Image: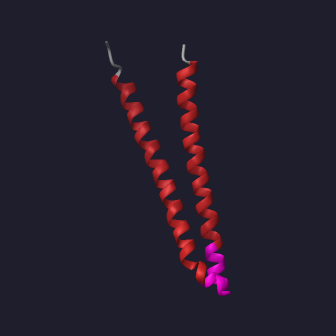
Amino acid sequence: MNIDWTKFYEVAIGAIGFTAFVVVVYSLGVRLLTNAQHVAPAAAKGDAKASRSELLNRVAAYALFALAFVALAYGVFLMFDKMYNSK
């Protein structure tokens, strides 16, 4: 059995980089959602600045969650595509 170490390192670095990307994007989404929850009471009282801040944080958080989901779905697609279409 002969291992092509160059390809092994490429796969290892790609997997670690992809995982780090998904974790960072999801973590930023959680942080922005937490920020939105912290300003929600002030926004409910009618503070315009807090309302804008809450809206922007929520929109950005959901966008980051969607980006993390799309990246993860793409990774799963690549994995299954390689498993079932390799010849």
Which residue range is magenta in the image?
A: 42-54
Q: Residue at x 67, y 84 (%)?
A: 48
Number of numbered markers: 0
Q: Is residue 28 placed above or below 67 in the rendered structure?
A: below
Q: Position of residue 26 (x, y in %)?
A: 51, 55
Image quadrant in which you'd find residue 56: bottom right
Image color mode:
secondary structure
Q: Position of residue 28 (x, y in %)?
A: 50, 60
> Which quadrant, please, contains the N terminus?
top left
Q: Is residue 39 placed above or below 20 in the rendered structure?
A: below
> Which quadrant, please, contains the C terminus?
top right
From the image, give the main secondary structure of the stretch colored magenta.
helix
Horizontal placement of 15 versus 78: left or right? left
Nearer to the camera, 17 or 61: 61
Q: Does the magenta-highlighted stretch encompass residue 47?
A: yes
Q: Is residue 60 placed above or below 12 in the rendered structure?
A: below
Horizontal placement of 9 versus 28: left or right? left
Q: Residue at x 54, y 60 (%)?
A: 29
Q: Position of residue 67 (x, y in %)?
A: 59, 50
